Image (cartoon, rainbow, N blue to C red):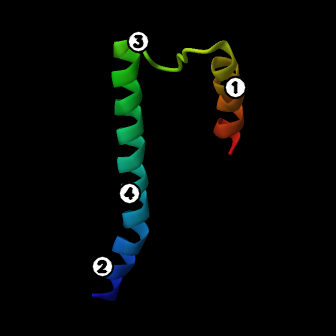
Amino acid sequence: MSSILEMVRILLPLILTGGIAIFVVMRMKHKYEEGTLGKKKSKGAQQLLDSLIPLVMIV
């Protein structure tokens, strides 16, 4: 019984993280197909977005 609980404690974070990753990827795919992925109306907002993407990826 305790080994089953230990396996659940190990796998649950992996399953949750995987679910979140799949949700994000599917949302990005939807935005890409619409043509609105990473496009802002103002030039300043677009530059801010472009400069923050690498920073967020590092974090």
Q: Say whether disc 1 or disc 3 marks the residue closer to the N-terminus.
A: 3
Q: Say whether disc 3 or disc 2 marks the residue closer to the N-terminus.
A: 2
Q: Look at the numbered discs 1 and 4 and tell me whether their residues touch, using CB distance below 8 Å.
A: no
Mark 2 or 1, which is nearer the eye?
Answer: 1
Other-residue count near label 4 (Cα within 10 Å), few / some / many at <14 / 14–19 / ≥20: few
Query: Pointer 3: what residue?
Result: 35
Quadrant including the C terminus: top right
Spot the residue most to the left. Answer: 1
Spot the residue most to the bottom. Answer: 1
Q: CA distance from mark 1 to mark 3?
A: 19 Å
Query: Pointer 4: what residue?
Result: 16
Other-residue count near label 3 (Cα within 10 Å), few / some / many at <14 / 14–19 / ≥20: few
Q: CA distance from mark 3 to mark 2?
A: 46 Å
Query: Pointer 2: what residue?
Result: 4
Residue found at x 69% / y 25%: 48
- Which image quadrant for residue 25? top left
| Element at label 3 | loop
Spot the residue most to the front. Answer: 42
